[in-house]
């Protein structure tokens, strides 16, 4: 099983990738709109096919990436049948199973934070994804969006706390940098509902939290009731179209040497190696301009923006950093030459 815990900082949201390497299948739990491109890149680099995106509930603090990933990758969208969401492919209920190759995610309905909360349990309780029902040493708020503190207490005790004690629990959010807990830990140490705390104790605690409403509530909730689909698709930021670029999990736009060889006059080729390397055994691309990386940050103003920029170095590492420097300087049309001069020479393309 391939497992990755991914993080979106603005809303402190965890997205979870589960993949089966032999079958090449994967699902994403709780994807975020702003990080959909990152998730797509990771899935591609791992050689997986995204079968489904799964929501633990209808979120109020971020817009889901489910619709966008479905458009780009053809993945299905799964969400609780009780969430009131339009546009999902799979309306999930208690006991439903989502296959991931030889593995299975089983649905447990855990309402209380919202009426449509579910927990996804991998196989026989190796790990579970609790959304906002059970957090690490906490629990999801119950003061809006069909929340019910008593119902949440019962959901956690009847559906989550009955999993094996060593079952790893992964929440949809954490605001203190914590990443994982276990059923045994939360049974013992959760200050809201662990130990001998009763349902009435929990309800009293939750009814007096006094939390402000989520900052993105007015934007996120209506969008998530549409699975993250925008009201106007033209509002979606377009990917760069000046070349067939690839976005890496490292966050770098890259261009293939074959495309660059055919379109050299249409771009500015910026070589960021040292002078010795530029004139050394690997040579350089005929149209390239030399601007070493250690000078680039101070000399970005001298870089022509009349044409898109392709950065080049020996193997692609320094030139990847060069794209970051140029973008921070406000230069938008920039990409890294994948594999650098080593790959360029290996493919037999011309050098000087």
Image (cartoon, rainbow, N blue to C red):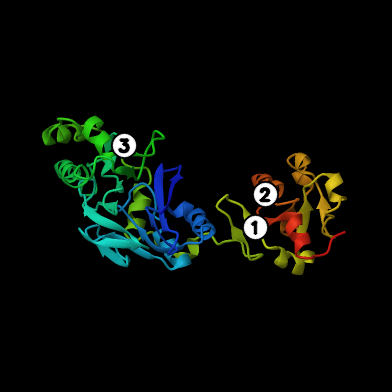
State yes or no: discs 1 and 2 in contact (Cβ < 8 Å). Answer: yes
Q: Is residue 296 among what the camera can see?
A: yes
The residue labelled by disc 3 is 136
Q: In which quarter of the image is residue 99?
A: bottom left
Label placed on residue 44? none
Q: Which residue is at a point 55% across and 62% down the rendered structure image?
A: 238
User: In terms of depth relative to the viewer, which is nearer, 46 or 60?
Assistant: 46
Q: Which residue is at a point 57% across and 49% down the rendered structure image?
A: 250
250 sits to left or right of 139: right
Residue at disc 2, secondary structure: helix
Disc 3 crowd rating (10 Å Cα; few below 14, some 14-19, many 20+) is many
Q: Where is residue 17 in the image (x, y as percent from the top left)?
A: 42, 53
User: In terms of depth relative to the viewer, which is nearer, 308 or 231?
Assistant: 308
Q: Which residue is at a point 65% across and 57% down the rendered structure image?
A: 254
Q: Is residue 231 among what the camera can see?
A: no
The residue labelled by disc 1 is 254
Q: Where is residue 145 in the image (x, y as percent from the top left)?
A: 24, 49
169 sits to left or right of 308: left
Q: Quadrant of residue 91?
A: bottom left
Name the quarter where the N terminus is drawn. Answer: bottom left
Q: Position of residue 201 (x, y in %)?
A: 14, 31
Q: Position of residue 287 (x, y in %)?
A: 83, 60
State yes or no: discs 3 and 2 in contact (Cβ < 8 Å). Answer: no
Residue at disc 3, secondary structure: loop
Residue at disc 1, secondary structure: strand
The residue labelled by disc 2 is 320
Q: Is residue 310 above or below residue 330?
A: below
Disc 2 crowd rating (10 Å Cα; few below 14, some 14-19, many 20+) is many
């Amino acid at each position: 099983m391939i497992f990755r815990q991914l993080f979106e900082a603005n809303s402190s949201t965890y997205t979870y990738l589960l993949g089966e390497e032999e079958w090449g299948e994967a699902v994403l739990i709780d994807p975020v709109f702003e990080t959909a491109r990152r998730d797509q890149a990771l899935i591609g680099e791992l050689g997986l096919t995204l079968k489904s995106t799964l929501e633990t509930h209808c979120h109020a603090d971020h817009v889901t990436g489910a619709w966008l990933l479905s458009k780009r990758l053809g993945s299905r969208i799964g969400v609780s049948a009780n969430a009131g969401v339009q546009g999902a492919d799979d309306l999930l209920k208690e006991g439903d199973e989502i296959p991931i190759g030889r593995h299975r995610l089983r649905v447990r309905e855990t309402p209380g934070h919202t009426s449509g909360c579910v927990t996804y349990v991998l196989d026989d309780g190796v790990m579970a994804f609790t959304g906002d029902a059970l957090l690490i040493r906490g629990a999801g708020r119950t003061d809006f969006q069909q929340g019910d503190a008593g119902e949440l207490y019962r959901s956690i005790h009847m559906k989550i706390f009955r999993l094996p004690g060593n079952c790893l629990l992964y929440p949809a959010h954490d605001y203190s940098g914590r990443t994982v807990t276990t059923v045994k830990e939360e049974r013992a140490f959760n200050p809201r509902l662990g130990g001998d705390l009763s349902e009435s104790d929990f309800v009293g605690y939750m009814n007096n939290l006094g939390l402000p409403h989520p900052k993105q509530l007015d934007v996120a909730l209506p969008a998530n009731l549409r699975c993250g689909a925008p009201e106007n698709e033209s509002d979606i930021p377009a990917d760069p179209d000046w070349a067939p670029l690839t976005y890496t999990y490292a966050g770098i736009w890259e261009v293939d040497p074959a495309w660059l060889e055919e379109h050299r006059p249409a771009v500015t080729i910026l070589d960021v190696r040292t002078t010795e390397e530029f004139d050394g055994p690997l040579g350089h691309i005929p149209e390239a301009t030399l601007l070493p990386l250690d000078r680039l940050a101070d000399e970005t103003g001298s870089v022509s923006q009349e044409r898109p920029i392709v950065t080049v170095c020996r193997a692609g590492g320094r030139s990847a950093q060069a794209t970051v420097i140029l973008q921070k300087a406000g230069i938008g049309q920039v990409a890294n030459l994948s594999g650098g001069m080593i790959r360029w020479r290996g493919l037999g393309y011309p050098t000087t």
